[in-house]
Image (cartoon, grey):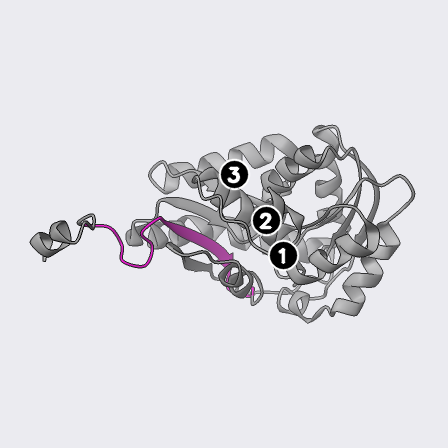
Amino acid sequence: MGFLNCVNGEVPGRDVLGWRRKFGVIIPSTNTVVEPEFHAMSVPGVTAHTGRIHIRNQHLASDEDMLGLLEQIRDEIGATVERVVTAEPDYMVMGMSAETFWDGVEGNRRFKQQIKDTSGGLDVATGAEACERALQLFGAKRIGVVTPYQPVGDENVVRFFGELGFEVAAIKGLKCPSAVSIAHVTETELRDALIEVNEPEVDALVQCGTNLSMVHLADEAERWFDKPVIAINAATWWMALRDNGIEDRLHGFGSLLRDH
């Protein structure tokens, strides 16, 4: 088989589907949106291989519930990463966002280092850093934010962006009662939330929470508002592709993947 590969000009040992890159993707077991949205944004030769963090208690009805969910993630994420890396991915992608905003810029740095150490040195795309890069690319300074979180989650989002010099002019936390129920938020509810945070002089809108289905709506909303609307799943996937030298342009998921 190796001889045939050489004759055909193929590289022996290269994954036949993920011949450009294989991404290891980490998501909570309760998340039913980020995986299909990543797959919808797939490009030839790049494959995503998912590990699920076991969430035993998915309640999110209070700040305490949200903190409890994050504790579950912290307890389980190491083993999840270890399982995913047995597929020998080239790069890690976080299909979860709250933890990447927690404790501000330094918290995101520590989180990335933890994933890098656990994965054997792989670089990682996080939602928080992806949003930072996108906002810098667009030259945004004043932003409106939509999240599925309780107030404690919103506070950490505001802290992260504030430490980077972005002003969060308005934030709408949808206070979803459970991790699974985040995926039940409708396009109408998301549209209304975007309208609510689109205050005068806001340069861009940002959606956090990878279990909110937003990538297609964000593409439409950019035409309504005539400004960038950053869906976190689109931004994270964009960061992963561009970090790996994949410059394919995708339509239907917002200007970030289409034009940059």
Q: Are marks 1 and 3 in contact (CB under 8 Å)?
A: no
Q: Given the image, on which type of amino acid does mark 1 rest? A: Phe
Image depth: mark 2 or mark 3 in front: 2
Q: Position of residue 168 (x, y in %)?
A: 81, 39
> Which residue is the site of mark 1?
253
Q: For the point 90% across and 46% down, which residue is it?
A: 199
Between 242 and 108, the residue placed more toward the observer is: 242
Q: For the point 69% across and 54% down, which residue is it?
A: 64
Left or right of 207, for residue 225: right
> Which residue is the site of mark 2?
257
Q: For the point 49% across and 37% down, which residue is it?
A: 112
Q: Given the image, on which type of amino acid does mark 3 rest? A: Phe
Q: Given the image, on which type of amino acid does mark 2 rest? A: Leu
Between 146 and 117, the residue placed more toward the observer is: 146
Q: Position of residue 213 (x, y in %)?
A: 65, 63
Span colored in magenta: 13-31
